[in-house]
Image (cartoon, rainbow, N blue to C red):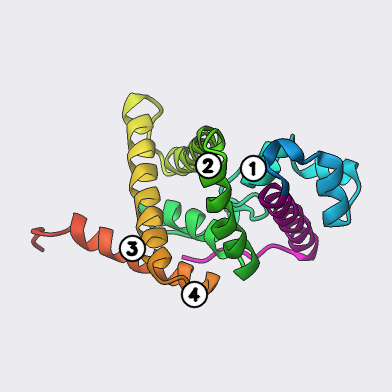
């Protein structure tokens, strides 16, 4: 499977988004969630409030990294993905999202966990974030199935959801393995690839030629 890479403009947008996230997380750790304003986040990130709102709807979304373009990989055109199966397609979409992370993004995620410990109310919004991402993956998979000739209906809906759940399980397995000994963002991609291989092998256990 192959996938195109984001261009310079998309990479710049991603860097700005990550910078705003880092500023939001750091300020909340320093002053508490209620003690931080959007203006303070914008100032720390060295952007204007208008730029802030180009990327995030509110303060909570900035802290949680919920961009306005909430997709698994908003800066990558999924139409460039070449895969030979619905599962392979879904895995490539998720891999694209993980591959966008750099070491600074991973570091932000580590600090974000401390924010959750101090502000448990944000966990509910984090669950909504995960649900939005899963909905995004499901839509992409459903489109792939449709283009592959699978007729619309409850069966296709179930197939798309089942594929999404399986691939996101691989992502969770990768994050669990990676969190035991955090290294680099690239290693997280490797863990995801291994998790996909492991799940694929498990699903084919007992099958004969």
Q: Which mark is residue 77?
A: none
Mark 3 to mark 1: distance in Å? 25 Å
The residue depicted at 10 percent of the width and 63 percent of the height is 209
Task: Give the extent of the magenta segment.
Answer: 1-30
Helix, strand or loop status at disc 4: loop
In the image, taking residue 182 as reference, residue 5 lies left or right, namely: right
> Callout 4: few (<14), some (14-19), or many (20+) C-alpha neighbours within 10 Å?
few
Foreground tag (1 vs 4):
4
Disc 4 or disc 2, which is closer to the eye? 4
Mark 2 → mark 3, Cα distance in angstroms = 19 Å
Per the picture, the main secondary structure of the magenta-coloured stretch is helix
According to the picture, the residue beneath numbered tag 2 turns out to be: 133
Q: Earlier in the sequence, mark 4 or mark 2?
A: 2
Residue position for label 4: 183
Asked whether 10 falls inside the magenta stretch, the response is: yes
Closer to the chain start, of discs 4 and 3, is 4
- The residues tagged by marks 4 and 2 sit, at their Cα atoms, a distance apart of 24 Å
N-terminal-most mark, 2 or 3: 2
Alpha carbon separation for disc pair 1 and 4? 24 Å
Q: Which residue is mark 1?
A: 66
Callout 1 environment at 10 Å: few (<14), some (14 to 19), or many (20+)?
Answer: many
In the image, residue 28 lies in the stretch drawn in magenta: yes
Q: Position of residue 134 (x, y in %)?
A: 47, 40
Among numbered discs 1 and 2, the one appearing first in the sequence: 1
């Amino acid at each position: 499977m192959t996938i195109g890479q984001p261009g310079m403009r998309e990479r710049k947008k991603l860097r700005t988004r990550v910078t705003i996230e880092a500023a939001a997380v750091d300020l909340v750790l320093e002053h508490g969630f209620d003690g931080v304003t959007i203006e303070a986040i914008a100032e720390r990130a060295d952007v204007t409030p208008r730029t802030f709102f180009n990327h995030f709807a509110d303060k909570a979304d900035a802290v949680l990294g919920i961009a306005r373009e909430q997709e698994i990989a908003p800066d990558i055109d999924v139409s460039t993905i070449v895969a030979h199966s619905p599962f392979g397609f879904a895995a490539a979409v998720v891999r694209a999202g993980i591959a966008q992370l750099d070491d600074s993004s991973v570091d932000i995620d580590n600090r974000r966990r401390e924010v959750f410990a101090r502000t448990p109310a944000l966990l509910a919004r984090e669950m909504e974030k995960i649900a939005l991402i899963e909905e995004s993956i499901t839509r992409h998979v459903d489109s792939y199935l449709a283009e592959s000739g699978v007729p619309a209906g409850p069966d296709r809906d179930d197939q798309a959801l089942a594929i999404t759940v399986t691939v996101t399980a691989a992502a969770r397995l990768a994050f669990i393995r990676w969190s035991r000994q955090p290294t680099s963002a690239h290693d997280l991609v490797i863990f995801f690839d291994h998790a996909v291989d492991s799940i694929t092998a498990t699903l084919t256990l007992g099958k004969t030629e």
